[in-house]
Amino acid sequence: GMKPFSTTTAIIGKSGNASAMASSLLSNSHRLFQKCFHPENDGTMERLVHVLRDVFWRSTKANPTVRKQLGVPVQVERKVILRFSSIERYFYNLQHEETVLAASEQRLQSQQEEAKNKHNDNSHNLKSSSLAASSNKPRRKINHKRARARNKFLSLQLQRLRAACCHPQVGSSGISSTRSNVKKRGRESKGHASSNSVITTGGVLTMDQILDKLIDEAKTKCEDSQRIAVLHANALACLYRLRIDAKIFDCNNNDKHKDESIKSDESFLLESAKVYCESLEMTSTNSNPVNVIGEARISGNADCFQSPCQIIRDGMAVLTWYFFGDSMVSEDRDDTSKTATTRTEKDGNTPPAIASAKFTPLRPALPLWCKIDFECPAKKVTALKIRHILSQPKSCEYDISSDSDENILLPKECVLQVSNAALGGAYVDARRFVIDSDRQLENSDGCDTGDGNERRDVGSWLVLDGFCTNKSKNWRLVVESFHQSQQKQLGNPLRAFVGIEIKLMEPEIAIDNLQRLHILHNLASLLENVIELPQCKDVGVKKKDNGRQTKKKSTNLTPIWNSILGFESGATPPTRSQFSQKLVELKDEYDKFENLYIDVARASQQSSKLLLQEASRARKNCNNEILTSNTLATSCASNKVRSNNDFEVEFASDTSTGNWWRDLLSWCHIYGNLSLKDSLIDIVNTELEVFMNSSVGGVGKHNTFGVIRPLSNFYNVDGLELALKHRYDDMNDSKRRKKFILCIQSVEKLPLQPSSKEILENSVCHICRKDWFQVGPKCRHCVLEENLDKLDKQFRDPVVTCVLKTLVKWLRDKMLRNTFTEASFMLDHRQLLSSIENEANQYFKFYAAAQKELVKAKAMWKIHFDLLSDYDELNACRSTMRLSRPKEDVSALTEQELNSVVFPNDINTLSMEHTAKQTMALGQLRRNKDTLRYLQNQSKERKLLAVNRKKQKECGTEISDEPTCVVCLSPLGDERAVLSCGHTFHYEPCLKMLMARARSGPYISCPMRCSLRTMKNDILIAVEKARNDGSKKIRDVQGCWGTKVDRLIADILNIIELGERCIVFSQWDEMIHIIGCALNANSIAFESPKGTKSFGDCVRKFRSGKCFVLVMNVKSGGEGLTLVEATHVFMVEPLLHHGLDMQAISRVHRIGQTRKTYVHRYIIKDTIEVKIDCVRLERQENNNNDSDLIVCQPEICAGGIDGGFNAKDLQEFLK
């Protein structure tokens, strides 16, 4: 209620009193003014705003008075604290470990540089001050650069942590980054996506798929650690054997070597055998077959396969075929053991055909097949389980159980095939097998699928293992024959059902086959040395048996051999016959693995040979068609046959149809007018110019054709014919045709079993074995490769091919437009031109067949080279280290030979080195196995939870995500115990019961039979104090998109039900793409602008109410927009740039907004986001003005678009 100061002075002036009175009033008003606006008094700010309201600059909406004057409603900020799921937490911990390790390394380097600079400064102080100053200045500059580089590197590591908080696929370090998919989607949708546009989720993985990838990565790490451990173990075992030969050298007479010379040969062989057997046992245990991890897509015969393009998990699939009506043929019932020949196809759509089949009723017209294409990395299948389905499932589309024509067929002869990349994706047989119907029917029983589906009548499992394959993503199962139907046959049935259930299995930790062969070979060689020892001779030993003394053969060896080699344990040493029997077993096992290893390459070469023979037949068929269609060519060919020149018959088409272009140019020269000739020359010149300027062509450029030589200049038809004749004759002369046939025949004759001479030549070839630093002469295989490359360059002249295709194109164009009819040509001219066109088509068909044959020949050469490489690797794995010979000149050895030479004085040093490295590798293997087991248990729990949720949903009960205890199977409470394997239990009484079972031992064994044991001190106790942290979804969401996205979609669904609209901001394009896929999966209309051209269209659609959600990048969409139609703003991640954060929120909370607005912030608990949000709040408090949105340039960029921080902030983040 106070009046302004100027009004008070005006009243005093009107009174006309003395100046004293005026001065008194002024002093009183001054004291009153100070009293009203003193900061210690209440309501000072409100009175000051009231006085200055006319000139007040409204610089912030945080002040309620300013917000009231602007007419902006209240804004509510909701901070949702979320918790990671187990998968996301594991991925975040991986990124966190790398960041901590990088920070430690950078901090160590910084400390080393500081110590070095301090030492240099002390040394420079001894010199003159001028020299010290001149030398210090550039050094400090270099140190500052290094410090900035370190800080930038660390900031990038922090950015990876920020990305991991959003989703495992976000950022450059994410799993299968969707960056390329985002760009592709942006191009397809022209910058935006709406409810009508279809967003492919090929780049976005579910949590189960991410878990599968993490399991694959953990398995790869285990395989690498195991490979390194076995490598050093083999070296250590070999060094024990070398100690026997090293005793005769006695290079030094120190005590150490005297102790080594006292030891017997048996002790060294015993230690070596112990190391070999431990490695063999470890690899055998780790390679136990388990179900294949990951998703796969199955497909089969287009006319009868049920559930095409179905997604299966863990290699388990139910394959069913249904034959109906005309898809059935008859087959002789007596011939149940018919033979089948496999023909490999490239595309995989046509399975192997059945040869020499006698038909009876109720047999499919085509062999049954099913492709299994894995979405995850390539799999190495080493075992297979298969069984019959004896009754039709209820879910089958066609019901034959109620029909009188009922018939169920049982597959008999089957083959598992694997795709070979060297053959262009063609399938190669991996294992052939026969399913016995009698055993299947005897052991038949009803079973549950385990995934919540219906029960089926099935047979017993047929387990197939012991086969070796290469890794591949594509597999195929082919059914080649059937058993006689077990069902009753009535009349002429027209329907049949075929069903099998399979499980593809892979080793838990795959073993390197070459390392296993090395162990078996060297262990067998070691036993041969043991048998030759004098102590290994059998001697009679008296032994009391029931009071009687009997003689038993034994040796003077140490009884420890019993436990090492797996003999019967006891105090009696093993006999010589036991060693001999063990030696035979090792050799048999080695031969078995060697054959399995080499059979993979042999099968590939056999398949490539069949493909080459098929291509050769196709070329010959084209040649025969040409000879048959041309009387002159047929006569010419018959004369050449009589002259016994097979090579000319093979390429008779070159003489019969190779002149079609000459006939065309001659006809054009004789009968064509000037415009016709000019059009021909113009189109040829144009096409040649385009080809020579293209990326494939180019004068003097090197490409697959070699160096491109341009065609000679021509200006008329005669010149074109002369220039073309010179190049064409050079490409198709008789000598080159003979070389082509001879070269193809040489490739086709490559043996499946190379001779020892060929293997030796290839192993020392300086071209084939360049990586192994071999210096031998060129082998015959390299000569064959050179001939193939030379023929390829000579046979394929791209310039000639371009001209010939242009001539055919010109001819077809003129005939299609009836140009010759308008020129009043005779009817026989059109017949002549038609015959020329037919000859041209036959020529190009033959030309394509010959090119395909050459490609298949190259593929077979490459596979034969792989076969030779496998033999070379087998020879290498049989080799071992040796001692240097007396007075040996090691400088004359190659690098590979020198690596296998050991000097006697270095044995002890190398033994300690390999022992230390083996110990480190075994420790890393144990840690990686613990990680793998933890992830596998997480996968099992998620599958069990999915099955339970499915059953609960079918029963209509409440769905609960509460985990259960694996001991008592009751829900876990607020307190639980977690073992190292990842399984959780009740702290009381389940854990105490396990600890009581362990008694006084330091370890606790998991009741789930996990190989990983947990020390009592390593048991984790998890306490859940509150459940209202926002991590639990408030409603069901279609799909599993991660913690943040699931909660975001659930909140958006609730907002849409209220009829309100919202804006979602994120700084990651990958996160925007994931959110868009999740919105699309939940049928939520949205817009996501990607470019400046479509930005306005997306905003207009959002304002018009066509969609409820607008998903934008915080940088491109956080400025210059007024979107008061929305009332909710979702900040997916906290931003360092508080001004950018406020700008994004101001799109909704601004002048013109008439409704209450909400800001939703999602922050993951116990992550870097908590610290970033604290930094944002601190900066916002220090500079709380909407107008001051431009902050100073940070010292370090955070790697994103939301600003950065200084070195001090970086150190705070790394604490």
Image (tube, rainbow, N blue to C red):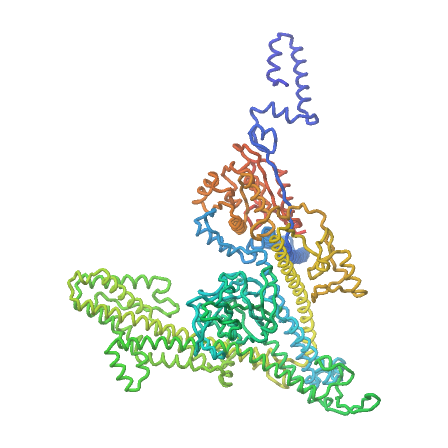
Nearer to me, 58 or 1038: 1038
| Number of callouts | 0
Nearer to me, 565 or 488: 488
Seen at 72% across and 89% down, the residue is 536
Q: Is residue 1208 left or right of residue 199?
A: right
Q: Is residue 189 above or below residue 285?
A: above
Q: Is residue 79 above or below residue 578?
A: above
Measured from the top left, where is residue 614 in percent x and y?
40, 76
Q: Which quadrant of the structure image shows residue 209?
A: bottom right
Nearer to me, 511 or 1171: 511
Q: Is residue 115 left or right of residue 333?
A: right
Q: Which quadrant of the structure image shows residue 968?
A: bottom right
Q: Is residue 961 above or below residue 906?
A: above
Whether residue 252 is visible here, answered yes or no, is yes
Seen at 30% across and 81% down, the residue is 648
Nearer to me, 131 or 1126: 1126
Residue at far right of view: 547
Q: Is residue 506 left or right of residue 659?
A: right
Whether residue 148 is visible here, answered yes or no, is no
Measured from the top left, where is residue 126 in percent x and y?
68, 57
Measured from the top left, where is residue 1055 in percent x and y?
56, 41
Q: Is residue 957 left or right of residue 736?
A: right
Can you say which quadrant of the picture contains the N terminus? top right
Measured from the top left, where is residue 697 in percent x and y?
35, 65
